Image (cartoon, grey):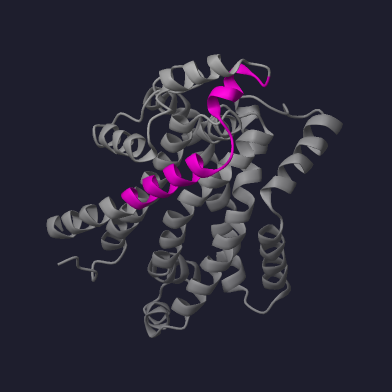
Amino acid sequence: MLRFLARRLALTIPVLLGVATLVFALIHLIPGDPAQAMLGETAAEEDVAALRARLGLDRPLIEQYGGFLRRAARGDLGTSLRTSEPVTQAIVDRLPATLELAAAAMLVAIGASVPLGIVAAVRRGTIVDHAATTLALTGISIPNFWLGPLLAIVFAVELGWLPVSGRGTLAHLVLPAISLGAALAAILARMTRASLLEELREPYVQAARARGASRARAVLRHAFRNSLIPVVTLVGLQFGAVLTGAVITETIFAWPGIGRLLIQSIGFRDYPMVQGCILFIAVTYVGMNLLTDLVYGVLDPRIRYD
C-alpha cells in the first residue's frame, strides 16, 4: 500500500506541472492587458506602464513562469492583481461554498440514481426499465447551463418557491444542486443498472437464493455490493467534473464559490487567481482518483496494491 501511494504521488508531479505550464502559457499568450483592464481604456500610457512594472508584468515570461513555479512549490499561489488578496486565502475562503454545492449535487445524484438503477435492473425489460432508461437519457442530454436557468425561471421567478440566487439557507442550495447533479444522476443510473445486471447473472446470486435468502437480500446484500466498483469509479472521476460544472452553475445562481471566482478572475485577467483556481481543480481531480483507487480495496478484498 505504501509503495502504491508513493508511486501514485510521484506520478502527480508531472501532471500538475503540465497543468500549471499549460494554464500559465494560455493565459499569458491570449490578447489583453490586466493593467489596462484595471485602469480603464482612458488611462495614460505612463500609468499603465507603471502599474505593469509594479505588478511584475513587464518581466520576461520565462522569469514570471519560474517565479510562479517556485511560489507554487511552497504553497504560495501569488497575490490577486485585482484585490491584492493572497490567492491561496481567496480559494480557502470560497472552498466551503464549493464543497457544499458539490456535496449536495453528489447527494442528489446518488440518491436519485442508485434506486433508479436497481429498480431498472431488477425489472429488466419492463415498462419500469424503459421509463428509467428514458429518464436517464433525458438527464444526460440536458446541459446544466440550460437546466439551471430553466429551474430558476420555473421555481424561483414564476412559482416563487425558492430563491433565485445567493447562498445562506438550505433553500438557496436546492436549485444549484439539482442543476449540477441531474446529469451525473443520469450517468450513474445507467452505470448502476448495467453493473448490477452483470452481477445478477452470476451463479453466486442463485446460490444465495437456494440457501434461502430472499430476492431483496440476494440483490442488495450480494449482487449490489459487488456491482459497486464501477459505480464508485464513476463517482470518483465525476467529482472532478462536478467541480468543473460548478463553474457554470455558480455563475448562473451567483453562488460564491471557486467556480464563480474563476469566471470573475478571467474577466479581469487576474493571472494569479486564474492559475490558482485551475491548479486547485487539477489537484482535486488527482486526489479523487487516488482516493477512488484506495476505496477499491475496501469494496473488493481481492484487490491488492503490491
Name which residue lies at 74% across and 47% down.
Answer: 146
**Residue 30 located within the stretch drawn in magenta:** yes
Q: Is residue 109 above or below residue 75?
A: below
Name which residue lies at 64% across and 19% down.
Answer: 40
How far across and down, in percent of the image, does residue 86 sit? 39, 21
Name which residue lies at 66% across and 60% down.
Answer: 140
How far across and down, in percent of the image, does residue 27 sit? 50, 41
**Residue 53 located left or right of residue 175:** left
In this rendering, the count of numbered labels is: 0
How far across and down, in percent of the image, does residue 207 sit? 37, 82
Q: Nearer the viewer, residue 292 or 83?
A: 83
Location of residue 35 by image quarter = top right
Q: Main secondary structure of the magenta part?
A: helix
How far across and down, in percent of the image, does residue 107 sit? 53, 45
Q: Quadrant of the N terminus?
A: bottom left
**Residue 6 located within the stretch drawn in magenta:** no
**Residue 184 located left or right of residue 291:** right
Residue 82 visible, this angle? yes
Q: Nearer the viewer, residue 95 or 229?
A: 95
Q: Quadrant of the C terminus?
A: bottom left
Q: Is residue 299 above or below residue 124?
A: above
* Farthest residue, direction front: 46
**Residue 57 located left or right of residue 292:** right
**Residue 42 located left or right of residue 213:** right
Q: Is residue 80 above or below residue 290?
A: above
Q: What segment carries the magenta color?
A: 16-41
Q: Nearer the viewer, residue 207 or 153?
A: 153
